[in-house]
């Protein structure tokens, strides 16, 4: 009993193949030499010897394929010789009968096919008769591997000579070609399937691998069918596809069924798929339960979606691809209870992409995808989906695909079944998805202009809005948290309705939702919310002609801001709250309405209170005083009483700073409050030169009280420069005599200093100032 492939080790395969190739080359050489000397019979003898190598059962399919290719190349030489012979007038019919007397069936049939192909070219007998004869004769080889390659050789030899005429001729028509290819396909598929049942069960995995390597041999038949010219669409619908489907479903082999169904999708035109969509999908439900039907349906969806996207007019009006595919997919899922959640969700992803490509304007279709997904998850009792859980990757992909493809997330948020889908995620996975959604929205600059949309969005990104009760905050990475909340802050700037009243509702709703986020979050989210409110207040000011109660609405907005900023104060974000109070005051000042002064004063007084009660660091006090004075200087809404109160308070707080230089600088800054062109209007008489001089004198006194000469000199030089500034602005109280007195104080202070780099710098500053004063005096 000869050894089988299973008993031949892999190491021996190369040796066996090498020996076989050696025989092939040797016999091919002898064949060519005989043919070159017109010794046809000897040539056929050597060809037969060469073909005997294909009788082996020892080679693996891969090695057998290499041997087959080597022999096929050599047989082309024989075919070329025979073509030349019939062109010289020799009869091929005798030779066609002669080769059938070869001793072994493998050489006999290969030679018969070779001669038959030439016989067809010679047109000496009807082509259809030879085709029928050849395809029937090949039944003589029933060994799966040898039979597969023999029939593949048959198809490769005759495929260029198949009749393609629609009308019947002497040599046949395209119908004969169809019958030939279908029969060859049927026999090849049976041989291919039979390979699975050869040998011991322990080699099943190896056989499956080998079969997959040979699948293209069977698929070549379908490729040839698809390339036949002159095939009417009805013929494909009524004859070709039913025959192929019959063979696929009857074989009951999962490998063959899955490959051939995918092959049909790939090789036949889109127009034909449209005409046979129903029968094809019905056939999917009859496939072996081991077949991954999901891949087949998805491949067809993607193919037709691309086709429809390129040429929407090619899809008949009465054909709704989404309805057809969604219904068939639902039936498949229902019929296959063992179908994994990953496969089901991948089907939904494919349907979502179909909607995006073809039915983008039909939002209800996308909602159906989410509804079906939610129902499946509920039916399978899938909740709290984590990263490692089956279906998690596909769920995330489904949501990302939809969000990324729609121009605005508002289109997605309006779908009733979209946001509820987030309830199935675990907190960690939902949080990761929330960050992705925020990134997508902020990068696009997508604006939300409805209260309902904002509420839906905040639910979709809820892990970024507030902590999970079971979450351990110690495990949160500070950098990741900061990035997440920065995205939330950017998102708030995208809340923008064209209707002012709706915008207020949006801001109020957002504040309510974000207020429960905890103290760590509000420092990121509340400031942009406040600035959005400032923007809305200014917008109402432009609507005074249209809205009779606009002032009440502006006041309400500032009350909203006051509440938000006070919340930051309670959370001990003192610097942030301080700055926002000042900004609120400035905003109120720029809006001309009845209560501007009282509202601005309230915010300024709140800032001062914060300064006095909460800011104790000397550097922070200095920075705060500078901001406070700068804000007051820029405001013009205050009456004399409120202005005097605030200005005096600023001067008093400046004089109480810890460091003398800071006191002097603060007092000097306060002088600008009494001279600013925006205070108490722009009239010159509104400027108080006496108060300016009083502040400068106070700064001089502070300088004299300094123990360190270098600090004293620096303050005096700074006061001198302020004097020069006010003199140039026309302050009558700051005369040249007064300036000369300050110059004297500067010189006295500088004379006390020892040589140093600091002294040199101050001295240069002083000299340049004096030089400037002298030039101004000369020009006066």
Image (cartoon, helix red, strand yellow):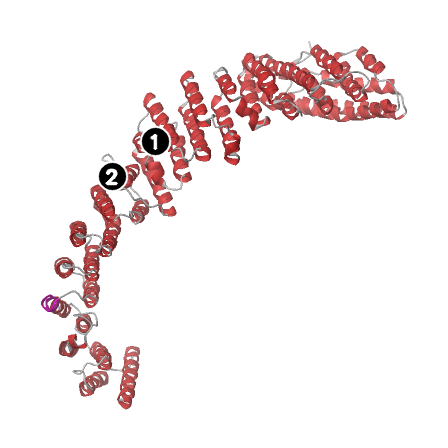
Which is nearer the N-term, disc 1 or disc 2? 1
Q: Position of residue 83 (x, y in %)?
A: 83, 24
Task: List the single residue furthest toward the front.
Answer: 545
To which residue does mark 2 refer? 467
Q: Position of residue 194 (x, y in %)?
A: 60, 13
Task: List the single residue furthest toward the bottom.
Answer: 778
Q: Which mark is residue 687?
A: none
- Left or right: 612 with respect to 17? left
Along the line of sight, which residue is nearer the eye, 145 or 331? 331
Residue 706 visible? The answer is: no
Q: Position of residue 135 (x, y in %)?
A: 71, 14
Span colored in magenta = 639-645
Q: Which mark is residue 386?
A: 1
Secondary structure type for disc 1: loop
The answer to whether 293 is drawn above or below residue 772 in the figure is above
- Left or right: 345 with respect to 704? right
**Residue 644 magenta-drawn?**
yes
The quadrant in which residue 740 appears is: bottom left
The quadrant in which residue 399 appears is: top left
Q: Position of residue 655 (x, y in %)?
A: 13, 70
The N terminus sits in image quarter: top right
Find out whether the residues at labels 1 and 2 contact each other: C-beta distance under 8 Å.
no
Secondary structure type for disc 2: loop
**Residue 556 magenta-drawn?**
no
The quadrant in which residue 109 appears is: top right
Along the line of sight, which residue is nearer the eye, 672 or 546? 546
Residue 129 visible? The answer is: yes
The answer to whether 162 is drawn above or below residue 524 in the figure is above
| Cα–Cα span, label 1 and label 2 | 17 Å
């Amino acid at each position: 009993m000869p050894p089988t492939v299973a008993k031949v080790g892999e190491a021996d395969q190369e040796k066996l193949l090498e020996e076989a190739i050696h025989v092939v080359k040797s016999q091919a050489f002898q064949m060519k030499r005989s043919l070159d000397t017109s010794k046809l019979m000897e040539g056929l003898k050597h060809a037969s010897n060469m073909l005997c190598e294909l009788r082996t059962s020892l080679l693996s399919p891969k090695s057998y394929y290499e041997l087959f290719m080597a022999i096929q190349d050599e047989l082309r030489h024989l075919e070329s010789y025979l073509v030349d012979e019939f062109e010289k007038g020799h009869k091929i019919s005798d030779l066609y009968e002669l080769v059938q007397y070869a001793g072994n069936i493998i050489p006999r049939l290969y030679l018969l096919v070779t001669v038959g192909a030439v016989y067809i070219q010679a047109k000496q007998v009807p082509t259809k008769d030879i085709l029928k004869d050849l395809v029937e004769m090949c039944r003589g080889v029933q060994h799966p591997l040898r039979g597969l390659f023999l029939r593949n050789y048959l198809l490769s030899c005759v495929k260029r000579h198949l009749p393609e005429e629609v009308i019947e001729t002497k040599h046949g028509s395209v119908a004969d070609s169809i019958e030939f290819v279908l029969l060859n396909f049927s026999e090849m598929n049976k041989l291919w399937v039979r390979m699975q049942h050869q040998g011991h069960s322990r080699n099943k995995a190896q056989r499956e691998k080998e079969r997959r390597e040979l699948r293209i041999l069977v698929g070549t038949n379908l490729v040839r069918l698809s390339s036949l010219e002159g095939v009417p669409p009805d013929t494909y619908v009524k004859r070709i596809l039913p025959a192929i489907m019959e063979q696929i479903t009857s074989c009951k082999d999962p490998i063959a069924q899955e490959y051939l169904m995918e092959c049909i999708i790939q090789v036949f035109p889109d127009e034909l798929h449209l005409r046979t969509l129903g029968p094809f999908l019905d056939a999917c439900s009859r496939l072996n339960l081991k077949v991954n039907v999901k891949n087949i349906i998805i491949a067809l969806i993607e193919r037709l979606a691309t086709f429809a996207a390129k040429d929407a007019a090619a899809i008949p009006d009465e054909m709704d691809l989404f309805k057809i595919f969604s219904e068939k997919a639902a039936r498949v899922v229902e019929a296959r209870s063992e179908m994994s959640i990953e496969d089901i969700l991948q089907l939904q992803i494919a349907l979502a992409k179909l909607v995006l490509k073809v039915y983008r304007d039909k939002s209800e279709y996308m909602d159906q995808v989410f509804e079906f997904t939610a129902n499946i998850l509920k039916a399978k009792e899938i909740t709290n989906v984590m990263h490692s859980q089956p279906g998690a990757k596909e769920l995330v992909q489904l949501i990302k695909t939809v969000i990324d493809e729609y121009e605005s997330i508002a289109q997605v948020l309006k779908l009733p079944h979209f946001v509820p889908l987030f309830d199935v995620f675990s907190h960690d996975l939902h949080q990761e998805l929330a960050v992705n959604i925020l990134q997508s929205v902020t990068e696009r600059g997508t604006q939300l202009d409805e209260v309902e949309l904002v509420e839906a969005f905040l639910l979709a990104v809820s892990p970024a809005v507030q902590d999970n009760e079971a979450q351990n905050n110690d495990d949160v990475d500070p950098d990741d948290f900061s990035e997440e909340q920065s995205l939330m802050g950017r998102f708030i700037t995208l809340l923008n309705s064209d209707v002012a009243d709706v915008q207020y509702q949006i801001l109020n709703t957002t504040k309510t939702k974000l207020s429960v986020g905890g103290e760590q979050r509000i420092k990121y989210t509340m400031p942009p919310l406040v600035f959005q409110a400032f923007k809305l207040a200014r917008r109402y000011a432009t609507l005074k002609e249209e809205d009779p109660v606009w002032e009440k609405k502006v006041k309400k907005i500032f009350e909203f801001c006051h509440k938000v900023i006070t919340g930051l104060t309670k959370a001990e974000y003192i610097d942030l709250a301080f700055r926002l109070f000042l900004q609120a005051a400035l905003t109120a000042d720029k809006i001309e309405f009845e209560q501007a002064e009282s509202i601005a004063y309230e915010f300024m007084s709140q800032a001062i209170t914060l300064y006095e009660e909460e800011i104790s660091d000397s550097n922070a006090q200095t920075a705060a005083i500078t901001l406070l004075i700068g804000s007051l200087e820029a405001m013009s809404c205050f009456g004399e009483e409120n202005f005097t109160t605030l200005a005096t308070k600023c001067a008093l707080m400046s004089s109480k700073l810890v460091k003398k230089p800071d006191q002097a600088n603060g007092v000097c800054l306060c002088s600008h409050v009494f001279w600013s062109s925006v205070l108490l209007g722009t009239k010159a008489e509104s400027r108080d030169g006496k108060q300016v001089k009083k502040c400068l004198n106070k700064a001089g006194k502070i300088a004299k009280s300094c123990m360190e000469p270098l600090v004293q000199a620096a303050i005096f030089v700074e006061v001198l420069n302020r004097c020069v500034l006010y003199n140039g602005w026309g302050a009558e109280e700051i005369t040249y005599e007064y300036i000369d007195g300050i110059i004297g104080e500067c010189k006295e202070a500088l004379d006390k200093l020892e040589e140093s780099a600091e002294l040199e710098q101050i001295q240069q500053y002083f000299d340049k100032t004096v030089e400037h004063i002298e030039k101004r005096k000369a020009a006066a």
